[in-house]
Amino acid sequence: RKEVEQDPGPFNVPEGATVAFNCTYSNSASQSFFWYRQDCRKEPKLLMSVYSSGNEDGRFTAQLNRASQYISLLIRDSKLSDSATYLCAVANSWGKLQFGAGTQVVVTP
Amino acid sequence: ETGVTQTPRHLVMGMTNKKSLKCEQHLGHNAMYWYKQSAKKPLELMFVYSLEERVENNSVPSRFSPECPNSSHLFLHLHTLQPEDSALYLCASSQGVRDEPQHFGDGTRLSIL
C-alpha cells in the first residue's frame, strides 16, 4: 500500500460548482498535513495546512479525519483559475514529508 | 521575487557530462531539500539538509551529489546520468524539518540525451 494515496482524477467541475476529494495516508503516527497546488509544469505551491479541527481559507476547506486516516479538500464556487493538480503532503513524526501523486481538477466554463 | 530560486530552469545534457543545479532561498529557513518529480509520479524526496548538515539521503544513486555550503544555498552535482534521470528537480526550504510547510523553487527541468 502506498504511504499517501490520491485519486488522480481528473475531476471535471462546472464553474461555480463545489468539488471535494480526499487523500489517504497509511502511517497513523503522521503529525502534519498540507495541501499544495501545482499548475502544469510549475512548482508546487502551499495552499493550506490542515489542522485537527479543520480549517477554511476563503473558498477552500480542509478537514482531517484521523480515525479513517484521510484528509480532504473542498473547493466551493469553483473558478476557472482553480484548474490545477492538488497534492497532499503528510509528515511523519520526524517531519519527513510524503507527497501524493496529486488529484487533477479541471474547471469548465 | 520568489523566496526559493533555482537555476538553471532547463538543462539538457549528455550522459557523460557533469553539471550542477543551484538553489538559493531568501526566506531565512534552516532546512533545504531536493526532490525529483517524474511524470505522473509523486514527488520523491532525495536529500534533506538541516543547518547545513545532511540529515537524510533517500537511497539516491551516487551519480547525484548534494552540497550545502550554508543555510541559504544548496547544490546538486550531476555526473554520468542515465536517461531515466530526466525529470523535474525541485528544491524546497522550510523553517525546520518538523511540522513546517515547505516552500518550493520553480524547479529545473532536466533532460538526459
Image (cartoon, coloured by chain):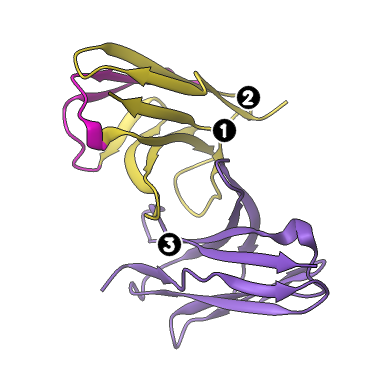
- Chain letter for purple, please: A
Mark 3 to mark 2: distance in Å? 27 Å
Mark 3 secondary-structure assignment: loop
Q: Judge whether residue A98 is colored magenta.
A: no
Label 3: chain letter = A
- Residue B83 image point, x, y percent: 23, 32
From what the image shows, is residue A28 above or below residue B73? Answer: below
Q: Position of residue B84 (x, y in %)?
A: 24, 37
Q: Where residue B1 is drawn, which disc sits there?
A: none
Residue, disc 3: A100
Quadrant of the image for the C terminus of chain A? bottom right
Q: Which residues are magenta?
A: B58-84
* Chain that appears yellow: B
Q: Is residue A53 visible?
A: no
User: Helix or strand or loop: what does disc 2 sit on?
Assistant: loop
Q: CA distance from mark 3 to mark 1?
A: 19 Å
Taking the spot 20% from the left edge, 29% from the top edge, the residue there is B82
Residue under numbered circle 2: B26
The three-letter code of the residue at mark 1 reads Asp
**In the rendered view of the protein, which quadrant contains the N terminus of chain A?**
bottom left
Tell me the crowding category of disc 1: few under 14, some 14 to 19, or many 20 or more residues within 10 angstroms, Cα based: many
Q: Nearer the viewer, residue A15 or A29?
A: A15
Q: Which residue is mark 1?
A: B106
Identify the element where label 1 is drawn: loop
Quarter holding residue B110: top left
Question: Which corner quadrant of the image does residue A97 belong to?
Answer: bottom left
Q: Position of residue A50 (x, y in %)?
A: 61, 67
Proximity of marks 3 and 1: CB atoms separated by less than 8 Å: no
Q: Amino acid at mark 3?
A: Gly
